[in-house]
Image (cartoon, rainbow, N blue to C red):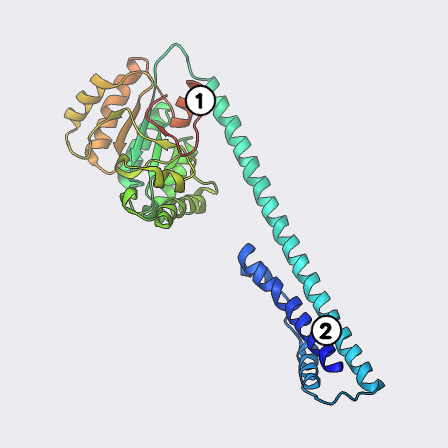
Amino acid sequence: MLKSVVKFITLFVCFCLFLPHFISSDSVNNNVFAEDIPANSVVSDTYIELDELAQTDSPQFDEEELLLSSQVASNLLSNISALQNRRIISIRETISKINTNIFQEGKKTAESSHELNERVSQIDLTRPVIALTFDDGPHYKITNRILDVLEQNNLRATFFVVGNRISSDNAYETLRRADALKCEIGNHTYEHPNLTKLSDIDIYQQFEKTNDAVYSVLSKPTTLFRPTFGAYNDVVKNNIDAPFILWSVDSNDWKDRNSAILSERLLSTIKDGDVILMHDLYETTAETVEIIVPLLIEQGYQFVTVSELFALKEVTLESRTPYRRP
């Protein structure tokens, strides 16, 4: 009789002690319980006592043995209760931190949305509007030459950055300057691979690692995504939670390294509502921007970010949906 009771208590205690660990390892990061109190000497000692007692074949026992069994069970249950209470407190603290972060991110999103609406309200609806976009940066020298033109004319653009380029003080400075000028920072993967050739997890990591890199500098993630080479499929869309921004005008600045050719091409092609693709990697691209911006301003063009352009045209950007122009 006593042997069966002791075995039951032993199994029950083990179940109570270890089940939460397995549950928590799946649903909550193990670090949540870094401060959990370990099974102390009382638990260890009483477990040994129970085990030894369980090995006794004699059915004879006295009141002292029953008292011991009762005390053992009481001690174990007390330790289980303390452990579980500590886990509950730890979980509550973690949930509180998560809720705080969600609130802060929600507040930032609300503020960003308000700022976007403010800027859109200042755009002249009677004049044409375009969005210059630049891929593959930041490049300290080239990107800053482009930012110089934007700042001098109080213009904005969108920069789709490659995450592994955000790895130096110069890159941090350039990114912060673009953000301070109210330019938009988009995600262009971490290492510029062709995503259609990657696995689900690799696609996801290419996106998230760049978000993390941008967040570490600007304290906010990217909100737009441009697939490398403009290549995507259903697998890519399923693994990247952001609007897919393509383009309606391709400068081909990566192929034609001649600012005169690029300028003529863009000036003869650009029209209201266009999203223009360029790369802030080449000297000739910076030269082209220095040439075409004053000329387009003379023609009445306004330069805005991608989000501003679509908001102005009353197009809501949906996650995992490709867009070339509003």
Q: Toward the viewer: 49 or 305?
A: 49
Q: Quadrant of residue 85?
A: bottom right
Q: Position of residue 116 (x, y in %)?
A: 48, 26
Measured in 3D between alpha carbons, the distance from the residue under mark 2 to the one under mark 1, in whole angstroms, is 62 Å
Instruction: Identify the residue at horizontal 46%, vertical 20% (top origin).
Output: 120
Question: Residue 248, can we see it?
Answer: yes
- For the N terminus, the image quarter is bottom right
Disc 2 and disc 1 in contact, CB within 8 angstroms: no
Q: Position of residue 6 (x, y in %)?
A: 72, 78
Q: Is residue 253 above or below residue 68?
A: above
Q: Quadrant of residue 218?
A: top left
| Residue 211 located left or right of residue 254 | right
Q: Is residue 94 above or below residue 296?
A: below
Discs 2/1, front: 2
Q: Quadrant of residue 221?
A: top left
Instruction: Identify the residue at horizontal 61%, vertical 44% (top origin).
Output: 99
Q: Toward the viewer: 18 or 263?
A: 18
Amino acid identity at mark 2: Leu
Circle 1: is it few (<14), some (14-19), or many (20+) Cα within 10 Å?
A: some
- For the C terminus, the image quarter is top left
Instruction: Identify the residue at horizontal 25%, vertical 37% (top origin).
Output: 229
Which is nearer the N-term, disc 2 or disc 1?
A: 2
- Where is mark 1, residue-wise? 311
